[in-house]
Image: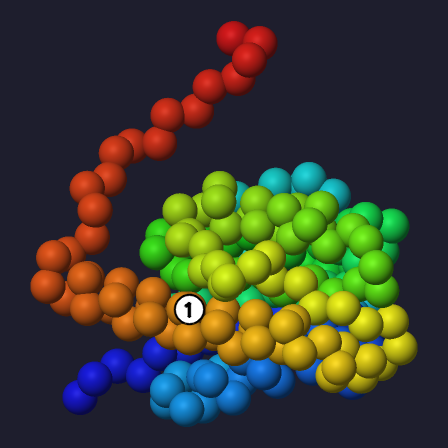
Amino acid sequence: MEKKLKVLMLNGSPRKNGNIALAFEEMEKIFAQNDVEYENILLGRLDIRGCIACETCRKNHKCAFDDIVNELAVKFEAADGLVIGSPVYYGSANGTLMSALQRLFYSTSFDKSLKVGTSVVSARRSGCTATFDELNKFFTLSNMPVATSQYWNNIYGWTPGEAQVDDEGRQIMRVLARNMVFMMKSISLGKEKLGLPETEEHVWTNFTR
């Protein structure tokens, strides 16, 4: 039986029905059409503190703060893809989301290689590309291929639901989801037919050495 693909979607907006939710809905339509299982979690209103560099996770393989981040870790490990969405705050992602992502990626020791990642950003006017680049960095230091669309993954709107009239932005989300599905399916097939790329022991260096 063919393995069902899974996508974890993390919405960093504090608004349940905001413009990131609208962007996610466009993607979810495509996932559903392709029989991809998805879970959408709203993080923006949760009380998620930042990392305190205690290094407890290096021993226990989970964060010392036993909150939703440890729950997300289990879901992330089981997923084939990760979608991160955030509105723009002062040219940056939502602070609650960033705290969650920093702790999630740092505290988890499982191999994230070839899980497909993508980020989605909404704004009234500016700051999308800076936030888009900020979020993509989580993927590019984790051996995760990044799914793209026909333009940067931005959607525009200020008040909740205003992005509904951004026809191009909504189309970008649908194209993005189709590309993400194709990448996940291709990687799954590649693993089956070709195996994983050869790995090397990680070399760590510091500039002060």
- 119 vs 196, left or right, is right
For label 1, count other residues whose C-alpha is less than 10 Å away and answer few (under 14), some (14-19) or many (20+): many
Q: Is residue 6 visible?
A: yes
Give how far across and how far down residue 76 sits, in percent: 49, 67
Please identify the residue farthest to the top as the structure is shown. 209
Q: Nearer the viewer, residue 30 or 66?
A: 30
Q: Kindly state the secondary structure of the residue where label 1 is placed.
A: helix
Please report the residue visible at 74 percent of the width from the left and 83 percent of the height from the top.
164
- Residue named by callout 1: 180
- Kindly identify the residue that appears in the image at 69 percent across and 82 percent down: 22
- Is residue 209 or residue 92 the one in the foreground? 92
What residue do we see at 36% from left, 52% from top? Answer: 113
Q: Measured from the top left, where is residue 161 in percent x and y?
A: 80, 83
**Where on the picture, by quarter, is residue 191?**
bottom left
Q: Amino acid at mark 1?
A: Met
The x and y percentages for residue 70 are 59, 65
Q: Is residue 98 left or right of residue 179?
A: right
